[in-house]
Amino acid sequence: MTIGGTNISTYGFFLSEVSGLYNRQARKRILKETAVEAEDIVFTGENVSVVLVGEFTSYTAVKIGIDALLVRISVERAYVFLNYSKTVTGFVTNGAKVEVNGLVIKVKFSITN
């Protein structure tokens, strides 16, 4: 997985889980009557959940890896899932949840466009 052109392994993480990558976007109902014109069809945002895991050798490496990853996901919009041949453009809207278990870190976040 790359975030803004940088592979997540650069920060010491790997992709553990991804969901919602191939879900079809639902149509949003904005008119009382269903319309079929292109300008009347509006889709809801795509929502992809991602779990990244990193195993580090020291607490200094943990801090550097988490800081670099969190800064990157807060400013980037392009997320490329290499193994799935899929690109998602969007923002991390609800922040990231970081779970620390010794030197193993799990980062969960959702990308919404």
Image (tube, rainbow, N blue to C red):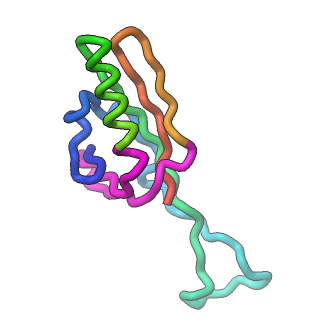
State whether residue 8 is above or below residue 48. Answer: above
x, y percentage for residue 1? 27, 44
Q: Quadrant of residue 89?
A: bottom left
Would you say residue 71 sits in the magenta stretch? no
Q: Is residue 11 left or right of residue 23?
A: left
Q: Quadrant of residue 7?
A: top left
Q: Quadrant of residue 73?
A: top left
Q: Who is closer to the viewer here, 26 or 102?
A: 102
The residue at the point 28 percent across, 31 percent down is: 14
The residue at the point 59 percent across, 65 percent down is: 44
Q: Is residue 111 left or right of residue 54?
A: right
x, y percentage for residue 106? 41, 24
Q: Who is closer to the viewer here, 71 or 5?
A: 71
**Total number of numbered labels?**
0
The residue at the point 49 percent across, 36 percent down is: 96
Furthest-top residue in view? 102
State whether residue 53 is above or below residue 47. Answer: above
x, y percentage for residue 83? 24, 45
Q: Is residue 17 left or right of residue 99?
A: left
Would you say residue 75 sits in the magenta stretch? yes
The residue at the point 43 percent across, 54 percent down is: 22
x, y percentage for residue 53? 35, 26
State whether residue 21 is above or below residue 31. Answer: above
Q: Who is closer to the viewer here, 57 or 82?
A: 57
Q: Which residues are magenta?
A: 72-94
Furthest-right residue in view? 32
State whether residue 30 is above or below residue 87. Answer: below
Q: Who is closer to the viewer here, 102 or 81?
A: 102
Furthest-bottom residue in view? 37
